Amino acid sequence: MNKSSIKLVTLLGLLLLSTQSISELPIRLYKQYLIGMPKAYLQKSHPLEDCSAKYEKGTLCMQKHSLAGEEAEIVFRFLNDRLVSIVLIMPLTNVSKIKKIFYALKTQFDLVLIEEDSNKLDIIQISANTFNKREFTKIIADFENEAYQKHNIKYTFISKKDFIIQSRKSRNFADIFKNAPMQMRAATYSVGRKNGQVIGTISFIVPGITQSYLDQNPIVEDF
């Protein structure tokens, strides 16, 4: 084998190791919580309660969590005892608090869709077809104001890092999730009425996560 062949084999080997390292990096779901964290570790680390009867089977929850200064209940969702989603549930007494949480999410995520019942505002599609920034802002504001009056709105976001890549090759919201990287982080923020109270619900998810990924990338915590 000549020198150039040896260099090529070495380079390919380093590239393979680099790719494996990247694929095995833990995915941060929300704050210190990682995709695949064992349920037993979370139960040991926090005063969690079983809230299967309140929400869905297998969920754990904890009171007095805080996001942007607003108190919330945090709910942990699992797939075969591995963390796959986190939900924050909080009362929102006025529109200013609704917007406060929205801007807190905007520090890490970019908006891709707004919904009000069956009405949808596709941010990716509008952005591609609207060249005037003022007009673009007005379209969103008008949609939001109508939804706020009904206290019924849902936002969908993806992480800023993923947005840079996915938005360049997407014509609409649906395209964002086509051929998206498995590690792409997303969040939804819904506002609605429940028992006469306005409630905000934020879900942090990684849509591409599968049982196979969890099996191949276990999170080992020091008990």
Image: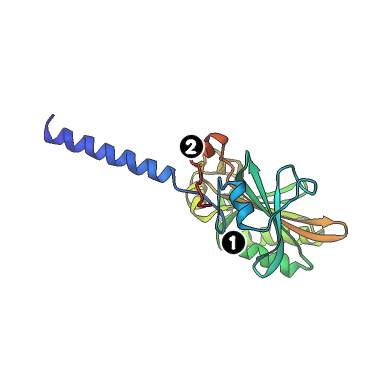
Pointer 2 with pointer 1, Cβ within 8 A: no
Kind of residue indicated by mark 2: Gln
Position of 193 with respect to 81 (left or right) is right
Q: Is residue 207 above or below residue 202?
A: above
Farthest left residue in view? 2
Where residue 48 sits, quadrant-wise, is: bottom right
Q: Secondary structure at mark 1?
A: helix
| The one of 142 and 43 positioned closer to us in this rendering | 43
Q: Tell me: 5 left or right of 161.
A: left
Residue 93: percent from left, percent from top: 79, 67
Looking at the rendering, which quadrant does residue 142 occupy?
bottom right
Q: Pointer 1: what residue? A: 106
Q: How is the image coloured?
A: rainbow
Q: Is residue 162 left or right of residue 73?
A: left
- At 53% across and 44% down in the image, what residue appears? 170
Q: Give SS at disc 2.
A: helix
Q: Pointer 2: what residue? A: 216
Find residue 214 and report its horizontal and vertical position in percent: 53, 39
Q: Going 27% across and 37% down the picture, which residue do you hit?
A: 12
Q: Residue furthest front?
A: 223
